[in-house]
Image (cartoon, rainbow, N blue to C red):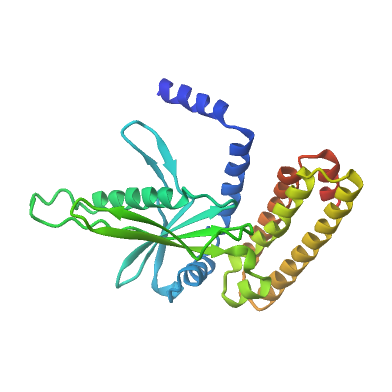
Amino acid sequence: MENDKANSQKSKKKLTRKDREQLKLDQILRVLFKLSKDITIQLINGLFDEKFVSSDVSIAYSNGEFVDDEYDRTIGDMFITVTSKQETITFHIEFQTLNDNMMVVRLFQYGFKKALEEAQASGAFTTGNPQEKILMKFPRQLVIYLEENEAIQESQSLALSLPDGREVEYTVPTMKYWTYTPEMLKRQKLYALLPLLAFSSRKRLKLIYESKKPEKEKSLLISEQFEQMKKTIEKTLEVLGELHDAKEIGTGDLERILRVLQNITTYLYVVTANSERLTRRCCRW
């Protein structure tokens, strides 16, 4: 236990500022997938084109942390298992802000480890019959890309060349979140994702802040982006109010969503600008 504690403290020291920022973002995003059961089922239906009825299924948030024989950890963003009378399906969602060519490789690793974990839990390796075929069921996966990037395709794939000469393609669909408006999210009942619309200006703000433009021009461009973000948040609040009035979102869920929206807004200003001047401007909101 002492070694574990020491290793844990050592790991914390190794965390870079970027790691800490990503960790906080991951925590914020996870809250959105742990709202009420009705909202979560609507979210799963919208993201994976399912037709689950909330009263007919149960949901569980399954393990997303995997430790290998070398004690190295890999952590997936969100695993949700939905069980109905007919079947049990595990869904895996990853959030990304940047395009990453290795994402599909990590998804394969996460999927394999989750399939192995569930096969072991079901007793698939303890039947005593070596001739019995072992079924390992990968979760259904989706990557949600939050920021605009023209290089991102509708899906990400890798090819597996098997020893018998066959080639199998492994494909995971992507969601280009930046293309969605509040009305689109409302129409598809992706209510839990509404607070993420605040991300729409993050990349542009960061590019402006890091550019070599004259300070006066940068200040003007940043102000314009702030105003655009303000309009986006105002529209998001309007849609959330409409959903609450129509009893599509309960008061408890609304309060949690609003807290997330506030945290995301603060996070974006602090991380994107990293400037006391810009942070003070943010806080005047």
Give the percent coordinates (x, y) of residue 78. 47, 53
Q: Which quadrant would the C terminus be assigned to in this image? A: bottom right
Quadrant position of residue 211:
top right
Which residue appears farthest toward the right when viewing the image?
216
| Rendered residue at 27%/58% (across/down) | 167
Q: How many marks are shown on the rendered structure?
A: 0
Q: Is residue 138 above or below residue 280?
A: below
Front-most of residues 113 and 121: 113
* Left or right relative to 254: residue 66: left
Give the percent coordinates (x, y) of residue 207. 74, 49
| Rendered residue at 47%/22% (across/down) | 6
| Rendered residue at 76%/43% (across/down) | 210
Give the percent coordinates (x, y) of residue 103. 47, 50
Front-most of residues 245 and 89: 89
Residue 107 seen in render: yes
Which residue appears farthest toward the front when viewing the image?
165
Q: Is residue 88 above or below residue 106?
A: below
Residue 285 seen in render: no
| Rendered residue at 52%/68% (across/down) | 43
Give the percent coordinates (x, y) of residue 155. 47, 63
* Left or right relative to 247: residue 121: left
Front-most of residues 252 and 127: 127
* Left or right relative to 218: residue 101: left
Q: Which quadrant would the N terminus be assigned to in this image? A: top left
